[in-house]
Image (cartoon, rainbow, N blue to C red):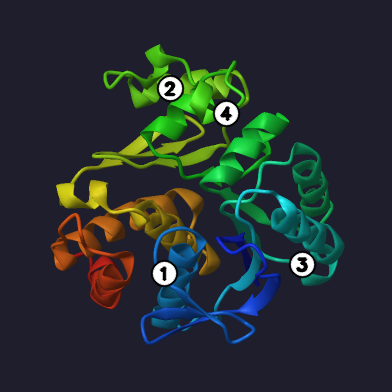
Amino acid sequence: MWLIVGTMPEEHAGLETGECHVRDGGLELPSGRMLPVARGTAALLGTAVLTCAHYGLPAPHAVLAGDIGTGAGSRTAYRYLTEHLASLRPQGITFHYLFPDVDWHNRVLMAAQSLEPQPLLVADAGFMYVAKMSGYADAYTLFTPDAGEMAFLADECAPHPFYTRGFLLDEAADVAELLERARRHGNCPPYLIVKGAVDSIAGPAGIMETVAEPCVPAMEAIGGTGDIITALVTVFLMRGDAVAEACLRAARCGRRLAALANPTPATQIGELLAFLPEALRREGEGV
């Protein structure tokens, strides 16, 4: 079992746990309610569900809470994890956006670390922020930041991306230098996919691979495309790929998907996912 944990932008949605399905272009939650497969955790889950179906894998177990930024729903999800991880015993957990609460983060991390074997831990979006804020970023397996988030991880003084110092956000900032700085201060895990115009795959020894082609500039303007990469790497890890190989395949497959879809800046995530099966087939064949 693999857990995907995140939030829905709904104040009174309550906690949803279990398998989700993609139906009629939307995400069907365990309760039967539908969410649009737009950006955010819904895009991540929708992509993961479809990718699992392609490979004949069981869908991930979702842990979703409604939260519009107050943190109340997120704390419900944190509490559920601390109480149920021991019985769920997941192979891995992908954390997306939860309200950054350091105390609850640490409780969840301790619960995960108490398991034997310990699950792989992947973090994207807001959960990277609280992982860094906690001082335990290096306890994770993989982060999937974009270039701005990478600069935040490299800034040992910034408590939130909003406060990242300008010299680290400079367009000329080198990913390898940002990585080394983040490592020096314990602010990142052994593996990262740094998403951007060129995707950088980092391992314990530094940048291992870069993926630049095919280049589809319109993808930069579409919210949620980074969530697709995080979903892809999650499923490649689920099926047992080594972390470095899973990262490389996710980056390549995301670009194949973009080339097949030929999007405009107005394209929505749900439209991109129609091309996912062909992108996965081509990744498997190395086309």
Residue 240: image x %, image y %? 53, 65
Give the mark, 1 or 4, whose residue is nearer the N terminus: 1
Residue 190: image x %, image y %? 55, 37
Q: Are marks 2 and 1 in contact (CB under 8 Å)?
A: no
Q: Nearer the viewer, mark 2 or mark 1?
A: 1
Q: Residue furthest top?
A: 167
Disc 2 secondary structure class: helix
Q: Amino acid at mark 4?
A: His
- Give the residue at x 68% y 49%: 70
Count neighbours of disc 1 (C-alpha within 10 A) and say few if under 14, some if 14 to 19, many if 20 or more.
Answer: many
Count neighbours of disc 2 (C-alpha within 10 A) and say few if under 14, some if 14 to 19, many if 20 or more.
Answer: many
Relative vertical location of residue 160 with respect to residue 270 in this rendering, above or below: above
Residue 254 in which image quadrant? bottom left
Give the mark, 1 or 3, whose residue is nearer the N terminus: 1
Count neighbours of disc 4 (C-alpha within 10 A) and say few if under 14, some if 14 to 19, many if 20 or more.
Answer: some
Give the mark, 2 or 3, whose residue is nearer the N terminus: 3
Residue 157 appears in the figure: yes
Marks 1 and 3, how far apart at CA: 23 Å
Q: Amino acid at mark 2?
A: Leu
Give the mark, 4 or 3, whose residue is nearer the N terminus: 3
Q: Which mark is residue 47?
A: 1
Relative vertical location of residue 111 with respect to residue 131 in this rendering, above or below: below
Q: Amino acid at mark 1?
A: Thr
Q: Which mark is residue 194?
A: none
Which residue is under mark 3? 89
Q: Which mark is residue 178?
A: 2
Which residue is under mark 4? 160
Disc 4 secondary structure class: loop
Residue 116 appears in the figure: no
Marks 1 and 4, how far apart at CA: 28 Å
Residue 255: image x %, image y %? 24, 56
Give the mark, 2 or 4, whose residue is nearer the N terminus: 4
